[in-house]
Image (cartoon, helix red, strand yellow):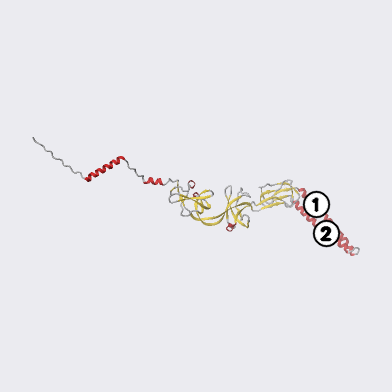
Amino acid sequence: MTILSAMPMSFRPVTRRVATGLLLSGLVLLAACGQKAPESPPAADAASAAQPAPALTVTTTRLESGQWPMRLTVTGNVLPWQEASVSSEVSGVTVSQVLVQVGDRVKKGQELARLAPTALDSQQAQAQAALAQAQAQAMQASSQVRRLKPLVQENFISKSQLDNALAAERSALAAVQSAQAALAVAQNRSAQRAVVAPDEGSISARNIAPGQVIAAGQELFRLIRQNRLEWQAQVPSSDLARVQPGQRVDIRLSEGGVVSGVVRELAPTVDTRTRMGLAYVRLEQPPATLRSGQFVQGDIELGQGSGQTLPATALVLRDGYYHAFVVQPDQRVRDVKVEVGQTLGDRVQILSGIGPQDAVVATGTGFIADGDVVRVVQK
């Protein structure tokens, strides 16, 4: 029998280092199966959690420098250039007819009212009778002188009697001259049967009615001469030195529109109560809607000057003050109160509050508040 002998198998001995590694790997695997380690958040999510969402997407603008028209804004009343008071020289005469009303435009010499002729004719007839009486007395005195002169030469009467007759003659001749002057006045008064306009213009006041008895010198009508109106601008005394005759003026009407004018002259005095002086402005082609007595606002052009401006859309009016929003480096806006000057077109002059280095929100200022985060985009 053949006996097979088994050959012993050879094994690689396991070293301590390998066993230790296997043991540690098993422990790690068991720990992983028992509890899952937390994951750290992405960096982008952390940044978004720290920064709030923008309130608005905006564009920015900065102050722009340039030549800026210097203007002085003032207020004042529109009044007639000259207003004539129309009266009559006659007295004690009744008004028979009034031919015009307030607002009517009249020409020079046009009849405004007619007077009753009865009293005027009576006064003229009375003056004529007084003249005839004076002339008769003068003739009688002259005849007396002619009769006495020969008698004096023949010594029938004394020379003193002739002197008295000569004095009576001179008095009678003077009475004739007085009666002639009275007749001329009566004739002139009789010719004034109508009250006429002394110049072209518009009737601004009427103070008589038919049947009224007028007095000499009584104001019957008031007339705006040549329909010319002017603006009497009230200028603070501190600014009077800047206003000169010949400067252009733009007057803003309450119903809209602008009327051009020129400074005609300045009043020589200042009101002690208001500390205001008057600048008289001649209006060029005022509209028919402009009325005497209107209170309007206007700008007097003082020349050119340098200034810094922002678009009007960059400003918001709150509580009577203008505000702008300056964008900070962290994209937050800061509410800044600014002092504004004049407005020209779509731009506003900025006097103080922000500087040329400030980035100002250009539009949408009514939808953001101080501290809001915005997203700035380029135009």
Task: Give the SS element for disc 1.
Answer: helix
Q: Which mark is residue 171?
A: 2
Closer to us: 155 or 325? 325
Q: At which x and y percent is residue 53?
A: 43, 45
Q: At which x and y percent is residue 144?
A: 87, 59
Q: Are marks 1 and 2 in contact (CB under 8 Å)?
A: no
Please give left or right for residue 231 compared with residue 93 in the image.
left
Closer to us: 13 or 78? 13
Residue type (three-letter) at the residue carrying disc 1 = Gln
Q: Which mark is residue 373?
A: none
Whether 150 is drawn above or below 350: the answer is below
Please give left or right for residue 353 compared with residue 199 in the image.
left
Closer to us: 290 or 338? 338
Q: Residue at x 76, y 54 (%)?
A: 185
Residue 237: name its quadrant: bottom right
Q: Could you tell me how many numbered marks the image carries? A: 2
Residue type (three-letter) at the residue carrying disc 2 = Ser
> Which residue is labeled 1 in the image?
126
Q: Could you classify mark 2 by the number of other residues whose Cα lies within 10 Å: few (under 14), some (14-19), or many (20 or more)?
A: some
Task: Give the SS element for disc 2.
Answer: helix
Q: CA distance from mark 1 to mark 2?
A: 21 Å
Q: Which residue ends up furthest to the right in the rendered image?
A: 156
Asked whether residue 123 is in view, the answer is yes
Q: At which x and y percent is residue 259?
A: 58, 51
Please give left or right for residue 314 compared with residue 91 in the image.
left
Q: Residue at x 81, y 54 (%)?
A: 130
Q: At which x and y percent is residue 353?
A: 50, 53
Q: Earlier in the sequence, mark 1 or mark 2?
A: 1
Residue 136: name its quadrant: bottom right
Q: Could you classify mark 1 by the number of other residues whose Cα lies within 10 Å: few (under 14), some (14-19), or many (20 or more)?
A: some
Quarter of the figure with the N terminus = top left
